[in-house]
Image: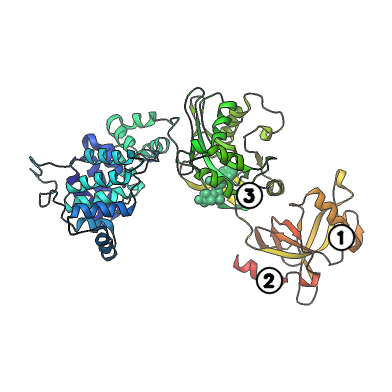
Amino acid sequence: MEFREFAARAASIEAEPADLEVVGLVTDLLDAADEELPIVARFVQGRVVPDHDSTTLDVGPSYLYEAIARAAGQNVDADDVEDDLAELGEIGAVAASYDFGGQTGLGAFGAGAGEGSDDLTVSEVADELEALAETEGDGSQDAKIDLLFGLLNRCSPEEAKYLVRIVLSEMRIGVGEGAVRDAVAEAFDVPVEAVERALQVSNDYGLVAEVARDEGVDGLAELTLEIGRPVQAMLAQAGSVTDAMEDWDDAAVEWKYDGARVQLHHEPDGLTRVYSRNMEDVTDALPEVVEFAHDRIDVPVILDGEVVAVDDDGSPLAFQNVLRRFRRKHDIAAAREDVSVRPVFFDCLHAGGDDLLDAPLAERHDRLTDVLDGGESPDDTAAAVEGLSKLWISADPDEIESIDADALDAGHEGIMLKNPDSTYSPGRRGKNWLKRKPDVETLDLVVTGAEWGEGRRASVLGTFLLSARTSGGEYETIGKVATGITDEELDDLTELLEPHIRSEDGQDIDIEPAVVFEVGYEEIQASPTYSSGYALRFPRFVGVREDLDAADADSLERVERLAETQ
Ligand code: ATP
């Protein structure tokens, strides 16, 4: 396909306001693309290489302005181009405003267009841009400007407009991923779902379009994950224990590690690559992950996880330390001396020849455990396996709270809640992965009662009754808190509260209002259970407000206000 035709079709798409018509026009474009279909399917989204390939053209705007100025002629310099940009607002329009001496005035894609002329093809543009991407090292910017200059010189204004937009990866013609997916389905008469799935495993619109055209739905179904071709990461949305309990029978609960996302691709005796969240190859920056793979994994795998920075004892360090390691290009050994990192894997997308995207999470985690423990699974919990994220299946909010408290105590960010039955959806931010919302507000509440603990903890207080202050100086109960408190803290709290015990009735203890707890919660509900008429959902202990007296505790009015505005 001539680039002139591509540009003319892109212009029609840009001029079309209706989404449905846009899909129709993209369908026509794909239909007309012949052997250049893979390139066209990328160009139409302003992409030069497949999504899984993090190669960039590495052409900064100033170099592009320079190339445009040179192609525009002797009287134009990069400053003029910038001035025009300020006026026209968009670099494509600026490029189109010059006459580069390309195929001006020829018909777009009408009969006879381009006959005998030096017409630029879509393939030539792709080849030149690939050459541009590969130009590295000293003097590379000049070489890139030369290459761009050469291309622009052969462009009509319309071609120049879309060429520079592709160079900057901003097509701006209103074609999103969904439109290309739908157009591939329509152009080659295959189900949208089959296209979607193929895109998830291959991350390559060009390949999927070509396979859909040449091999149909069966060919698409045969596309598999490939080691060395990164998959888009599944993402989480904010959510609560309440959300999880409402939607699922039980929840997979994991610690939320405060590091950076990595995807490990590893073949024993073969390729080992590590990719970042945006699919950049970060293998060289993270030798610890590569060593981990060589030492511990003896089947081909694609694993999803997090790298965390750790101190000499293996305790997690702040997330900024990990980022510093990611950015590091040189002197990796020295960087490693300063901050070492370790991987923690929480998902398994491929193991030993099996693609697992469609397997339920619980099964994927089992496979992950097998991969990492080398067949020597500990009897009790998988948590003991090095490099394996902890996972609990629970339907008990109290247990989930205490997992959260343990995670925070161990220096992690909190917890993730996942649907144990869910498949892995690359690139999706859905309801199946929830990152627990941090407390929006906390309440300072007075302890007005307690219960003794159980079993070996029978001599210390275990559960605390909380109250809010009324305007009349009374205290009305609002909930009980038992989670988020370590054994050591329970000992301290018992010591603190014992002098205030007024009476005991079996397990139940009446305590004079004196000590104030700061308490987190997920929601305030109207409830007849407590005398205030409200109850806290999932209350958890944050700390003792040593600086507050009972009279300074939060009022029932504040509770009412919070309940109304939440
Ligand atoms: P966003 O994903 O919303 O852009 P973000 O990258 O800052 O934001 P969060 O949303 O805070 O990340 O949380 C999701 C991220 O948490 C994941 O991308 C992953 O890097 C990290 N993470 C840590 N532990 C886990 C875990 N057990 N399961 C899934 N993700 C985890």
Q: In the image, is the residue at mark 3 within 8 Å of ligand 1 by its beta carbon?
A: yes
Label 3, label 2: how far apart the Cα atoms are: 28 Å
User: Residue 440 versus residue 326: which sits nearer the camera?
Assistant: 326
Q: Residue 507's x, y, as percent?
A: 88, 53
Secondary element at tag 2: helix
> Which residue is depicted at the point 29% across and 62% down?
89
> In which quadrant will I find the N terminus?
top left
- Separation (CA) of disc 1 from disc 2: 25 Å
Q: Earlier in the sequence, mark 1 or mark 2?
A: 1
In the picture of the structure, the residue carrying the numbered disc 1 is 497
Q: Is residue 473 above or below residue 511?
A: below
Residue at numbered disc 2: 558
Q: Say how the picture is coloured.
A: rainbow
Q: Secondary structure at mark 1?
A: helix
Q: Is residue 15 visible?
A: no
Observer-side mark, 1 or 2, equals 1
Is residue 74 visible to us here?
Answer: yes
Question: Measured from the top left, where is residue 55 in percent x and y?
Answer: 38, 40
- Measured in 3D between alpha carbons, the distance from the residue under mark 1 to the one under mark 3, in whole angstroms, is 30 Å
In-image side of 184 versus 417 (left or right): left
Which of discs 3 and 2 lies nearer the camera? The answer is 3
Residue 492 percent coordinates (x, y): 84, 55
Name the kind of residue labelled 1 in the image. Leu
Please name the amino acid that badge 3 sits on. Glu
Q: Are marks 1 and 2 in contact (CB under 8 Å)?
A: no
Q: Is residue 334 above or below residue 508?
A: above
**Depicted 525 relative to depicted 555: above or below:** above
Q: Residue at label 3? A: 413
- Is residue 485 or residue 269 the one in the foreground? 269
Name of the residue lying farthest toward the bottom? 472
Disc 1 residue crowd, few under 14, some 14–19, many 20+, Cα 10 Å: some
